[in-house]
Image: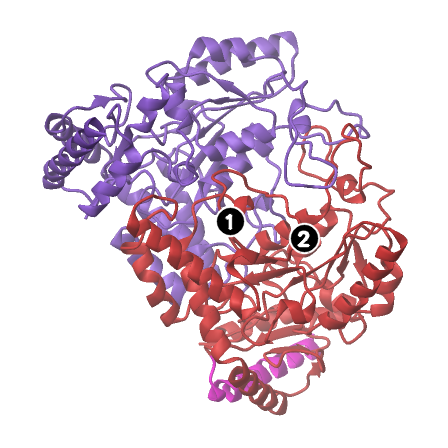
Chain colours: A purple, B red
Amino acid sequence: MIYLDHAAATPVDKRVLTTMEPYFLDDFFNPSAAYLPAKKVAADYEAAKATIAHAIGAKASDLVITAGATEANNLAFTAISTDFTLEFGGFRSAAARGLARSPRGDGRERRDPESSVNSVLYLETEHDSVRSVAQRYGGQTIKVLKNGLIDLADLKNKITDETELISVSLVNNEIGVVQPLAEIASLIRNIKLDRFKRGVKRELLLHSDASQALNLLDIKVARLGIDLLTLNAAKIYGPKGVGALYVSHEAKLQPMTVGGGQENGLRSGTENVPGVIGFAKAVEIASEHLNGNRKKYAAWRKILLNKLENYELINKKHALDNFIVLCYNGIDAERLIYLLEEKGVYVATGAACAASKGRKSHVLKALGLDDSQIAGSLRLSLGETNTEEQMRDAAKIINNAVSSEYKRVKKS
Amino acid sequence: MIYLDHAAATPVDKRVLTTMEPYFLDDFFNPSAAYLPAKKVAADYEAAKATIAHAIGAKASDLVITAGATEANNLAFTAISTDFTLEFGGFRSAAARGLARSPRGDGRERRDPESSVNSVLYLETEHDSVRSVAQRYGGQTIKVLKNGLIDLADLKNKITDETELISVSLVNNEIGVVQPLAEIASLIRNIKLDRFKRGVKRELLLHSDASQALNLLDIKVARLGIDLLTLNAAKIYGPKGVGALYVSHEAKLQPMTVGGGQENGLRSGTENVPGVIGFAKAVEIASEHLNGNRKKYAAWRKILLNKLENYELINKKHALDNFIVLCYNGIDAERLIYLLEEKGVYVATGAACAASKGRKSHVLKALGLDDSQIAGSLRLSLGETNTEEQMRDAAKIINNAVSSEYKRVKKS
């Protein structure tokens, strides 16, 4: 097996699983219980949160543990002031209007046509979990340039005095492009200063989904100027079903899930202790190897791009080296996936959840690719299951599959 | 160690962990990915859901997997028709008004004084996760009798034509009392028939939190007449951080978490495959031992009640045998917990999450106990870590602790 889809899922590192095991079997106590062994579990849980927080330059109490990045992204948007009613004297924000639902709860949200006040802005290349929740709040998109970077001019144009939240992922999940968050944060600081001078009291928060970034970039929330940061264990060789949202003091969240009051009342439910212990171990391992991993992936990327044939490279610049997006114009990449699968090489056409629904990649579309180019695009995402040798083998297998497909297409 | 707090947490059964392990390490693929090994994982995930569903007489597609019982309870309440706006022509339900938040999102919900239309009814002895979410929707309480059973007369009185959801847990988490759900469902059926005759179109749904019940009661949703049923892996020797909500065709939910569209669009986020595989194994093991476990706990309960001294038994009838609530009037049960802890016996005063906040048990209060009785109450919850011998040992240790406490109290 040559697995080249680490952006979709990573195996749990054996060291991570070993660290989790005692918390399944022996240290299984409810962290809220009164006796000593339970209090020890609670302390271990807090220490694990501190380890995760430390990696981004934050404290344990700044994190809300969630069931994954999707929940963290959804939770981040609750920072938008949600005044659902006229009765309590507030104006009704675009966010609230975006949330408006049809009377009998048929599961569809209706967008208010007036919601052009740009309460929420999000990058058009965001993952579905950000796009969906942003649309719930009447969010408007920020354009990207052809290279996948945020169009800062478009962002500037779209920020109004109503804008409360801007969501820009640190690393795109399809093309690996790293956004200049510090630059965006600096722009936001200037706008906040200007608002302050003019007496405009609305908050302006920067949210970033860093699901794909924690094992390759040194992320520090203060340096990047981030108010809300989404983290994910499952993409960095930790367990599925565990994520976290970093929350700055400026951001006031509303709980989505209420009950026992865990996570400072922001996310109730008995703590997933083994999951968080595993998340922390994965973060620890990732932090130790940031530079080594980046060098390794850069070398592997070079080998692949050297050995592969007849492709157009989509993410030429600004991308993490473990993301390689290839376009084989005129070929159906879906067919390639099945040909490669037969040879034990596993790749993707885009985000797994979007691809499974047969949708065209909104990310590649935003880069200006036409339908034929999008249909011919493959995403290789390298990771810890790979070896240098696999890069050469994969290139050969992909070249063969591509050339047989080109022949087949020419004939027909 | 003699662990008598299985209602707060259970260890993961070793067979459960063994079943989960390959899904951490080898079958780690994203179930939404296109290649065969990922599709196999997706099939295993669906099969695991089918196993869980089968135990309650349902199909895999009737379940929404969640991060635990708290999320499932919260999700259940989204079945209430939530018309947040006046603009879209609907009347604004009590539920929507109950959800009203203060303008600047300070995290507190305001209850509308008019919301006495009883849109939501819930048992006053429910777990905090039901109470909190019910209160968000302006819920009104249904009383219990002194024996902890639902006061059916009070329920009948409180149901109005506005009532949409009634939430009654199958087994209470503090006293183990089993509610007569089939009887409640039959009452609901009559009311629905009457509504139909009179042309009242509102749904009337029955939700039940069965977190504490799945390993001791044979639950079949059709027989019990339940529309929404909360299940929890962590209380039946499965992993923490995994639960499920059974949803009948009558109940139309709103997703709390949006994104990739997993779980039929009702709960987005990459599937927690190992968690659900483990949940299914725990359900399988539990189903095989329902009767054996009940007999075992009945025998152990007898031993305990025989050997223990100077107590008043709170949950005399209608409770599962593994729940034993003892009242030592005049003694501080919190102190008992620490004395017992020193001897390696771990017990609780009530729900872990409530107890950790130093709150008095609302459940014992609802049974009519006074403050002194509540302060002197201990919950023993038996489980699979126990042996018959432990029952005799625990009784001795508890008796000693209680008598030394009684002596101390008399002196002072």
> Mark 2 or 1 closer to N-term?
2
Q: Position of residue A257 (x, y in %)?
A: 60, 47
Q: Is residue A292 left or right of residue B243?
A: left
Up the image or down, A390 lies above or below B335; here it is: above
Q: Is residue B43 left or right of residue B253?
A: left
Neighbours of disc 1 within 10 Å: few (<14), some (14-19), many (20+): some
Which of the labelled discs sits on residue B251, or is there none? Answer: 2
Of residues A258 and B91, the one nearer the viewer is B91
Bounds of the magenta segment: B386-412
Q: Amino acid at mark 2?
A: Ala
- Residue B389 on the magenta segment: yes
Query: For the C terminus of chain B, which image quadrant?
Result: bottom right
| Whether residue A40 is visible | no
Q: Is residue A14 left or right of residue B386?
A: left
Q: Is residue A127 left or right of residue A20?
A: right
Q: Position of residue B262 (x, y in %)?
A: 48, 45
Up the image or down, B362 lies above or below B341; here it is: above
Of residues B119 and B221, the one nearer the viewer is B221
Residue B59, picture quadrant? bottom right
Magenta residues, dominant SS class? helix
Pointer 1: what residue?
B263
